Structure formats: structure tokens, C-alpha cells
Amino acid sequence: MKQRLYRFIFFRILGWKLIGEVDTNVKKCVIIVIPHTSNLDFFIGLLVRGIWNIKINFVAKKELFVFPFGYYFRSVGGAPLDRSGGKNNVDATAEVFEKHETFRLALAPEGTRKKVSELRTGFYYIALKANVPIIPVALNYYKKEVNTGKPVYLSGNYEEDMKKILPHFKGVLGKIPERSFVV
């Protein structure tokens, strides 16, 4: 029933299209969503996740997962990030992958809704350390489409791997076009 509601809102009311999908056989991955220019991106993402009817996760500092909010955050795919013991975000996030049989981490590598000229690299090193592929997802407001690419398995050579990932985002515009990451 919920999936039908998500489909109705996404396709009929908002007029968006879905191109591609996350292969459900890929149980662990880092899903990068570009561009991230508006808070509305989160809600579009929730609708897409509901249409696909698969679990997609996010991480946040463990302090957010206390009563009463912890239950809600876990129910919508959140996982607490424990950075105690001097762990950095990459190491702590890679550990989260180890603790789950299925964990698809969605994040915005821009790290902000403001205009950036370079992506933050944490998404890449999380995927590399967790030994999981990166799945590129373009959120194109100009065409009103969410375009999901094929998984990219990493070689460890950042520059070469980005040559496979970044073309997926060429010409994609966010809700606020002037803030869009330009490939």
C-alpha cells in the first residue's frame, strides 16, 4: 500500500521519472547522490527508496540514537556511528558495514547543499575500506528524473575510478541549479 502511495506521489503528482534501479543482489554498497542542493532532495530520496522497496541506510553520530529519537532513526534506515577510540569517519563507517548483512549507505559526497567545485573523498575511501561498490545516482531536477547507474567496483586508484563514476553526473542540475556540482 505504501509503495503505491509513493509511486502516485512521485510519478503522478510530482511528474518525475526513474531510470535504472539498485540491483537487490547488491547487499552492500555506497550510493552517492549528486547534486545535493536542497532539503527537498531528502524527500525525493525517501520516495525513490519507497518505490524500490529496498532498505537504504544512512549513518549519523551515535548520540542521535538515544530515546526517543533512536527508534525513529533506526526505523528509517539509520545506523549509529561510533567514533570513540580515535576512529575517523571512514574507519567507523566501514565498521558499520561489517556489522550488517545488508547495508546500502546513501550519502551526498558534496557534504553540503552549497556550491562546491570538488567532491569530498570520504565516500570513496569508505567504499574502498568496506570493499563495496559505489552506485551513482543522479538527481536531475531539470529533467525531473532520478537516474541510477551500475555498480562501480573500485581499483584503489581514485583518479581512474572517478573517470568511471563522474560521467554519470554530466549535465545534471539540482533543485537550485547554480549550486549544482559540475562535472
Image (spheres, rainbow, N blue to C red):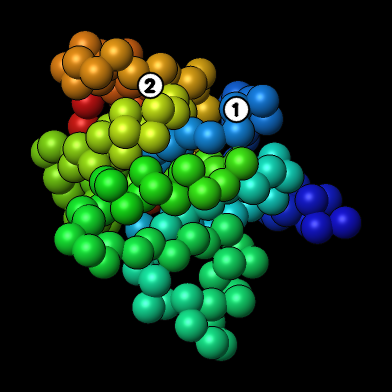
Q: Is residue 137 above or below residue 101?
A: above
Query: 10 Å neighbourhood of mark 1: few (<14), some, or many (≥20)?
Result: some
Dot 1 falls on a residue whose secondary structure is loop
Q: Is residue 34 above or below residue 165?
A: below
Q: Is residue 26 above or below residue 13?
A: above
Identify which residue is drawn at 49% across, 60% down. Answer: 79
Identify which residue is drawn at 53% across, 35% down. Answer: 28
Q: Which label belongs to residue 26? A: 1
On screen, residue 43 versus residue 156, left or right, reads: right
Amino acid at pointer 1: Val
On screen, residue 126 versus residue 49, left or right, reads: left
Q: Residue furthest front?
A: 85
On screen, residue 143 versus residue 19, left or right, reads: left
Amino acid at pointer 2: His
Camera sees residue 68: yes
User: Is tag 2's residue or tag 1's residue first in the polypeptide sequence?
Assistant: 1
Dot 2 falls on a residue whose secondary structure is helix
Q: Position of residue 183 (x, y in %)?
A: 22, 26
List the residue tagged with mark 2: 168
Identify which residue is drawn at 44% across, 65% down. Answer: 80
Q: Position of residue 73 (x, y in %)?
A: 54, 70
- Quarter of the view holding residue 128: top left
- 43 or 151, which is in the foreground? 151
- 114 or 127, which is in the foreground? 127
Task: Tell me the quadrant of the picture where the N terminus can be found.
Answer: bottom right
Q: Residue furthest left?
A: 117
Q: Which label belongs to residue 169? A: none
